Amino acid sequence: MKSLGFILSYLSAGQTRRNLRILATLLALLVAMVTIFSTAFHEIMEYEGQRHSWPTAVYWTLVTMSTLGFGDITFRSDLGRLFSVIVLMSGSAFILVLLPFTFIQFMFVPWMEARAQSRAPRALPKDLGGHVLLTGISEIEESLIERLNRASIPYYAIIPDLGEALKLHDLGFRVMVGALDDPATFCAAGADRAALVATTLADTTNTNIAFTVQEIAEDVPLVATANSAAAVDILQLAGCNEVLQLGEMLGEALARRVLAPDGRSQVIGEFGDLLIAEAQAPPAMVGKPLVDSGLRARTGLVVGGVWDKGRLEVARPTTVPTVTSTFVLAGTRSHLDAYDDAFATQRQPEAPVIIIGGGRVGRSAGRALAAAGMRYWIIEQQESRVRDPATYVVGDAADLAVLQRAGIHEAPSVIVTTHDDDINVYLTIYCRRLRPDVQIIARARLDRNVSTLHRAGADAVLSYAATGGNAIWNLLSDDNTLQLAQGLDVFRVPVPRELVGKTIEQSHVRDATGCTVVGVVARGQLYANPKPDVALSADAELVLIGDDQSEQRFLARFPGATTRGRATAR
């Protein structure tokens, strides 16, 4: 019955009906040709004095048209031989049309369409739920998909173009074909059963998508990106629960990585009451193992990691910071205040920070620095982008004279914010050669260029893709991770069964995985920087800090653990 239904639906399709009409016309033409040639066969044979039956005439016509030519029946006259040539040529030409058309239209094309349908369906299974719907595959979606795969959350990207959908499928993405402005597409995608719908296209397109989705799934969380500030209100009116201005978010995050000139801690994220901060290694701790610094006893802080020339190292008791080291600190507000009281100096503000690139990201970084009381210069090639001449240097940052006008030899930090990763690598190398001691913070458009920028000399790199992917991930549910920088996360997991009853010291989490325990959540309360002798209960949760490899090692070492907990980037 299913096969019969498929055949009936296939035959009822518009293109199929047209093909059947063409086939019927060709078959009618074939019958007419056989009739005419068979009649002519009889007449010419009578002319030559030969007699054959009508079945023989049809037999000879078909054998000749199909080029088989058995040779059992032949003409003797020139007229008969000329007629044979006409039948042979016309039959060959006709068969070259009829057979390929029949094979292609009724066998090959349906097979290809069925194959394409399995690779890029136009509807998702009815029993699918809790999935994430995307409206394209860009660098942001790729970063998000990596996290979704890690958490085993299904996703599908809705692609309007079949060719593009098939190409993405072959690259390993889950795709569905459909028009983004058609409610039927989102009905077929099960939008009303989805956990989240995310769109990162142009503002006008995002607005149309949001309004379309809200018609059929008004209770499903919907997140969109906005390129302009004016679009935020419109997108919210269209139905978006959250609107992300990623350029502004990335600019602020880059500015937060600029180390305070007086050595104070800079808060870069929060995990409930637990604050994550960065601070330059104090002179009093340079060259000494962390175990001899007495940092925890004096401030209550935990050093979760150490950045040094773009490399993140797990902070161990034997770690020896250098003059170029930056601490990743975890603790409460009172812990950070104690750190600032103990190690901050009274240095006067230094020369302005240099921001290379006056786009949305660069301008956002400048506003964040100004809010923190720090001066800056923005180097921008296009005069049309200049907002305030008092804070801009117009010119090419690859020109030494332009960098000198911006104060490259005195600047404490350089923030590289252009949209082109190749240019960012080029400028990072250039600035590092000019100033080996300057702090360089770079933006990467693609995740794969993060390591390249680190090798080029950047002290910290933030990826536009990872910023967007992480922001959407943090809106998916309460199971969230705080991404401090590219490759550095704070995440929360239930205490693995293997560690229940053991103390933090006995668990050897840092030695086994590289992750550092910076908090314990018990009975709904977060205890920051617990002491090593605290026993872990079955209903408690661990708050860990580590890079991507450390997190993967932890999840592999304790397969029952899953990341949990809401985090907020600042």
Image: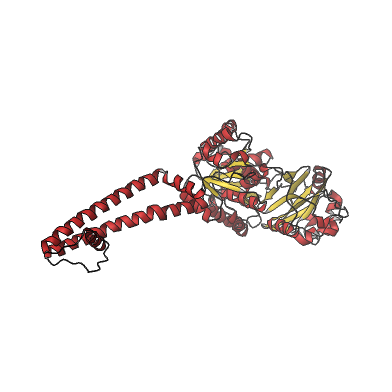
Image location of residue 440, percent across then percent down: 63, 52
Toward the viewer: 234 or 367?
234
- Residue 172 in which image quadrant: bottom right
Image location of residue 424, percent across then percent down: 56, 53
From the viewer's perspective, is residue 13 above or below residue 42?
A: above
* Quadrant location of the C terminus in the rendered image: top right
Image location of residue 403, percent across then percent down: 56, 50
Q: How is the image coloured?
A: secondary structure
Image location of residue 12, percent across then percent down: 42, 43
Describe residue 292's horizontal placement relative to residue 477 as left or right: right
Residue for point 40% across, 43% down: 14
Toward the viewer: 242 or 460?
242
Q: In the rendered picture of this protein, how many numbered marks are placed on residues?
A: 0
The answer to whether residue 334 is visible is: yes
From the viewer's perspective, is residue 545 above or below residue 64?
A: above
Residue for point 32% across, 48% down: 24
The answer to whether residue 463 is visible is: no
Toward the viewer: 562 or 81?
81
Describe residue 545's horizontal placement relative to residue 93 as left or right: right
Describe residue 211's horizontal placement relative to residue 548 as left or right: left
